Structure formats: C-alpha cells, structure tokens
Image (tube, grey):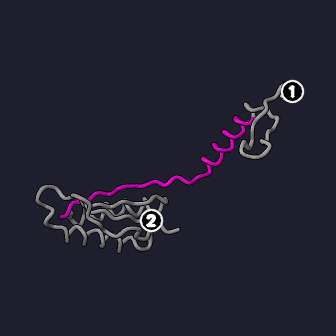
C-alpha cells in the first residue's frame, strides 16, 4: 500500500485465492481504458451475419417466383444468409406439399450460389428454409 501511495498508483489484487494474495501496482483507470479499447477492437473485427428474408405464398406464380429468385441470388452473392419461407394464410395450410416443392425448387435453382443450411420445416403457419452463401 505504501509503495502504491508513493508512486500515486493503485494496488490491484490479481489473485485473491493464492497464498499470499498476488497484488500489482498499476494505474487502474488506465488499465480499464485499455481493456475497453481491446474489447472494442475485437468486437469490430467479428463478422456480422446478415439474414435476408424472402416470403412466398403456397400458390406463388412463376413470374413472382422468378422475381424473388433474382433477389435471393443477389443476397447470396453479397454474402448474406437467406431465409426463405412460405406463409400459409387461413385454410391454405392444406397446400403444405406445394410450399415444400416451392422451397426445394428454390434451393435447386440457387445451388450454384448457396447451399441449404436447413431443409424446409413447418413451424406453425410458415415453412422455413435457410440458405448460406458459398465462399
């Protein structure tokens, strides 16, 4: 404590469980500042995963399908993940097979741009499928 007071620094306990406890003389505020700076730098280097969504109906027409397929292609080329889903409204839930066929057709058409991460799966009133971009 005396050494820390003489140098106008802080006495920081490093390992309290050791016998005797390990302490270090340092400027604690400067230490916290540098630690925050390091954490921020690591956080900025981390890759952020972007997920784009495309919504279909169970009876989506060919022209609409092609239009949405072009958007999906663009998203995958940009490096974003794609969440394609078929939304069933009201009694349209009886067309589950059509929704699954639509999503599998999309996966097949986008095979050269991305790979299927999760096959079509029905969750409540929507059937979802995830595609990840190819490197």
Q: Compute the Cα span from label 2 to label 1.
A: 60 Å
Left or right: residue 1 compared with residue 114: right
The numbered dot on residue 2 is: 1
Picture quadrant of residue 116: bottom left
Crowdedness near tag 2: few (<14), some (14–19) or many (≥20) residues, C-alpha within 10 Å: some
Residue at the spot 74% in from the left edge and 36% down from the top edge: 31
Q: Is residue 31 above or below residue 6?
A: below
Which residue is nearer to you in this view: 80 or 90? Answer: 90
Residue at the spot 75% in from the left edge and 38% down from the top edge: 13
Q: Is residue 96 above or below residue 1?
A: below
Dots 2 and 1: beta carbons under 8 Å?
no
Circle 2 sits in a helix, a strand or a loop, which is it?
strand
Residue at the spot 26% in from the left edge and 69% down from the top edge: 102
Q: Read off the residue under disc 2.
A: 132
User: Where does the image place residue 43, in percent across and percent down from the top left?
Assistant: 60, 47
Whether residue 53 is in magenta: the answer is: yes
| Start-end of magenta stretch | 31-59
Crowdedness near tag 1: few (<14), some (14–19) or many (≥20) residues, C-alpha within 10 Å: few
Location of the N terminus by quadrant is top right
Circle 1 sits in a helix, a strand or a loop, which is it?
helix
Whether residue 24 is in magenta: the answer is: no
């Amino acid at each position: 404590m005396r050494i820390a007071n003489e140098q106008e620094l802080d006495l920081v306990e490093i390992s309290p469980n050791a016998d005797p406890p390990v302490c270090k003389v340092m400027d604690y505020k400067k230490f916290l500042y540098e630690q925050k700076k390091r954490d921020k730098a690591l956080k900025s280097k981390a890759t952020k995963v972007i997920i784009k969504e495309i919504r279909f109906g169970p009876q989506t027409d060919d022209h609409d399908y092609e239009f949405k397929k072009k958007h999906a292609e663009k998203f995958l080329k940009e490096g974003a993940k794609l969440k394609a889903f078929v939304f069933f409204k009201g009694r349209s839930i009886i067309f589950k097979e059509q929704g699954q066929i639509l999503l599998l057709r999309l996966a097949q058409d986008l095979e050269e741009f991305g790979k299927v991460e999760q096959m079509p799966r029905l969750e409540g009133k929507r059937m979802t499928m995830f595609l990840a971009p190819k490197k």
